[in-house]
Image (cartoon, helix red, strand yellow):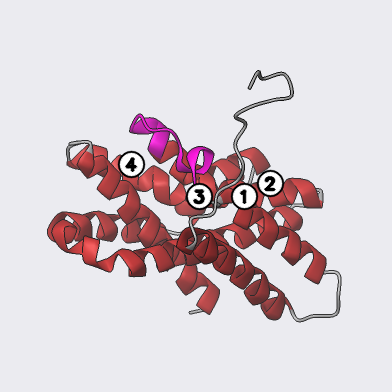
Amino acid sequence: MELIYVLDILGTFAFAISGALVASDKKLDLFGVLIIAFVTAVGGGMLRDVLMNAHPINWIGDLNYLYTIFTAVIFTFLFKSKIIYLGKTMFLFDTIGISVFTLLGLKKGLLFDLHPIIALIMGMLTAVFGGVLRDVLTNKIPLIFEKEIYASACLVGGIAYLILSQFNVPENVVFVLSACIIVIIRVVSVKFQLELPKIKEDLFTKK
């Protein structure tokens, strides 16, 4: 099994757990938890495939995604009180997940002969839209709109992939380097609580 595919599954597992935890905190029943875990884990890739008219849809073409989501939900129900101690591990899986999802989505867009800018957007959608769906469905302001450098890290990593791809560098090296850029930006931004600037005042605001 390829390393990238393993990382993809680990990212799906982490995303599904994050969705299950949010749904559980909202007191949803088992079916509700499963739905939220599902859209968190594969919602971004599903939206990408629908927009690109790519068939089969990501999770339909590979049942391992569904098995991973079911496993994540069961794991959450059995060990919810213990998962808090795995915070750093889950954060790592989540971060690896968004890096892999971004680049896989970008690569798929390029394979469909999309303009590189559109392919980059598809990569970002793959990585972050599942979390947006999770937050909207649970009546929260999406994390990427409120705080933390999240989508921006995906953007920078995707741009790095497009640039490095223009040089005579092996594909696996380009993928790993670009993924590492996303991971590093995400880790550093969380560690030092970095955020993008917010619009608070303009030139006409009275002081």
Q: Earlier in the sequence, mark 4 or mark 2?
A: 4
Q: How many labels does the image show?
A: 4
Question: Of residues 119 and 95, which is closer to you in this image?
Answer: 95
Q: Where is residue 190 in the image (x, y as percent from the top left)?
A: 47, 59
Residue bearing mark 1: 124
Do the residues bearing badges 4 and 2 touch, measured as CB atoms within 8 Å?
no
Query: Which residue lies at the image location 47% right of the left edge and 39% below the top edge?
Result: 132
Q: Earlier in the sequence, mark 4 or mark 1?
A: 4
Q: Which of marks 3 and 2 is nearer the N terminus?
A: 2
Do the residues bearing badges 1 and 2 touch, measured as CB atoms within 8 Å?
yes
Residue bearing mark 3: 148
Q: Name which residue type carries label 3.
A: Glu
Q: Where is residue 196 in the image (x, y as percent from the top left)?
A: 60, 46
The answer to which quarter of the image holds residue 50 is top right
What residue occupies the far right of the structure in this picture? 167
Q: Residue 169 carries which label?
A: none
Element type at marker 4? helix
Q: Give the range drawn in magenta.
A: 135-148
Q: Which of marks 4 and 3 is nearer the N terminus?
A: 4
The answer to which quarter of the image holds residue 82 is bottom left
Residue bearing mark 4: 36
The answer to whether residue 150 is visible is: yes
Mark 3, other Cα within 10 Å: few <14 / some 14–19 / many ≥20: some
Mark 4, other Cα within 10 Å: few <14 / some 14–19 / many ≥20: many
Q: In this view, does 37 lie above or below 187?
A: above
- Residue 59 vs residue 101: left or right? left
Q: Name which residue type carries label 2.
A: Ile
